Image (spheres, rainbow, N blue to C red):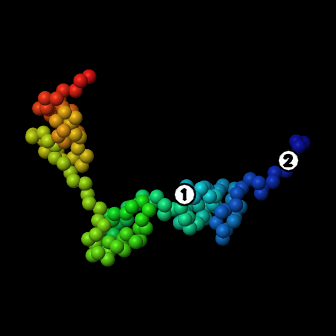
């Protein structure tokens, strides 16, 4: 018979860092916000009341009344920003959409949200006409290679 070794099961797992739980879990989760260890019931930041969850929150709140995106800084509270927006009659703190730009090539009707700027003539073009050869660049400036 093989020599059997006793394994201390208490040394294998980790205890949940939630003060109300402290359950021994053999497959613990680490919170990406506060870096503490939690059981499956407390693994999400909202499940263990993570204080670090609000720091650096990049979610964009949407007004439940007008469905517009609301301006929010990285450390601003979402509820406060939505409340300010609603109290202004859904007029303040609205995210303004980026202006779309029409391609500068006269025969092109393409409208681009992120146009390309020609390094020679400094005009804005669509993807198809972004190179100076494609839009017959009229600039006299030539890049030195």
Residue tagged by mark 2? 5
Quadrant for the C terminus in the image = top left
N-terminal of the two: label 1 or label 2? 2
Mark linked to residue 33: 1
- As drawn, the label of residue 100 is none
Which of 91/113 is in front? 91
**Observer-nearest of 115 and 93:** 93
Label 2 sits on a secondary structure element that is loop
At x 20%, y 51%, the residue is 100
Give the residue drawn at x 74%, y 53%.
Answer: 12
User: In this rendering, is residue 79 above or below 109?
Assistant: below
Structural crowding at the residue carrying mark 2, measured as other residues with C-alpha within 10 Å and reported as few (<14), some (14–19) or many (≥20):
few
Q: Is residue 136 something one can see in this rendering?
A: no
Q: CA distance from mark 1 to mark 2?
A: 39 Å
* Badge 1 element: loop
Residue 84 image point, x, y percent? 34, 73
Residue 74 vs residue 48: left or right? Answer: left
In this view, 33 is above or below 123: below
Q: Residue at x 66, y 68 (%)?
A: 19
Q: Residues within 10 Å of mark 1 (few under 14, many from 20)?
A: some
Q: Residue furthest top?
A: 145
Where is residue 44, by image quadrant? bottom right
């Amino acid at each position: 018979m093989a020599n059997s070794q006793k394994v201390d099961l208490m040394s294998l797992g980790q205890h949940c860092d939630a003060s109300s739980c402290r359950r021994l879990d053999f497959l613990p989760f680490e919170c990406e916000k506060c870096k503490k260890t939690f059981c499956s019931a407390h693994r999400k930041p909202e499940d263990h009341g993570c204080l670090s969850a609000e720091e650096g929150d990049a979610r964009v709140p949407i007004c439940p009344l007008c469905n517009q995106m609301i301006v929010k800084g990285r450390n601003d509270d979402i509820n406060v920003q939505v409340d300010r927006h609603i109290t202004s009659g859904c007029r303040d703190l609205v995210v303004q959409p980026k202006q779309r730009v029409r391609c500068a090539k006269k025969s092109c009707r393409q409208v681009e949200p992120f146009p390309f700027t020609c390094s020679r003539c400094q005009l804005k073009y669509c993807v198809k006409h972004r190179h100076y050869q494609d839009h017959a660049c009229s600039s006299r400036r030539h890049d030195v290679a």
